[in-house]
Amino acid sequence: MAQVRDALLVRVAEKRALLKKQEIVTAFGKVQPILDIHERICERLEGVIEQWDGDASSASEVSALIT
């Protein structure tokens, strides 16, 4: 994603813009924080899955991750 953003910004600098700079910043500005959050959620879910014993109480562990 960063490569696409950077390529678009280069085009802006070269006066060959496909989008306005602000549109690029808006579209790509929150991508990395969102990916970071999803990676942390994935890591935590992997831990829950590894410990999963089929017990209904495990559902409360998953619920705690998403609330």
Image (cartoon, rainbow, N blue to C red):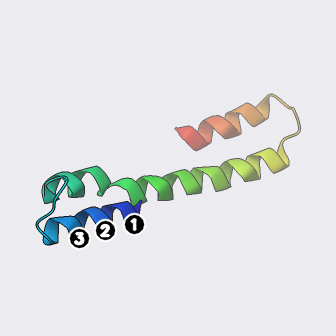
Residue 66 against residue 5 in the figure, above or below: above
- Secondary structure, mark 2, is helix
Q: Are marks 3 and 1 in contact (CB under 8 Å)?
A: no
Outermost residue toward the left?
15
- Name which residue type carries label 1: Gln
Circle 3 packing at 10 Å, graded few (<14), some (14-19), many (20+), is some
Between 5 and 45, which is closer to the camera in this rendering? 5
Circle 1 packing at 10 Å, graded few (<14), some (14-19), many (20+), is few
- Name which residue type carries label 2: Asp
Between 32 and 10, which is closer to the camera in this rendering? 10
Pinpoint residue 40: horizontal percent, then vertical percent.
Answer: 57, 56
- Secondary structure, mark 1, is helix
- Secondary structure, mark 3, is helix
Residue 24 quadrant: bottom left
Circle 2 packing at 10 Å, graded few (<14), some (14-19), many (20+), is few
Pinpoint residue 18: horizontal percent, then vertical percent.
Answer: 19, 53
Outermost residue toward the right?
53
Between 50 and 27, which is closer to the camera in this rendering? 27
Q: Which residue is mark 2?
A: 6
Residue 59 against residue 8 in the figure, above or below: above
Q: Are marks 2 and 1 in contact (CB under 8 Å)?
A: yes
Residue 3 quadrant: bottom left
- Name which residue type carries label 3: Val
Residue at screen point 55% across, 39% down: 66
Disc 3/disc 1 C-alpha distance (Å): 10 Å
Q: Are marks 2 and 3 in contact (CB under 8 Å)?
A: yes
Residue at screen point 60% across, 40% down: 64
Q: Which residue is mark 1?
A: 3
Q: Which residue is mark 3?
A: 10
Among numbered discs 3 and 1, the one appearing first in the sequence:
1
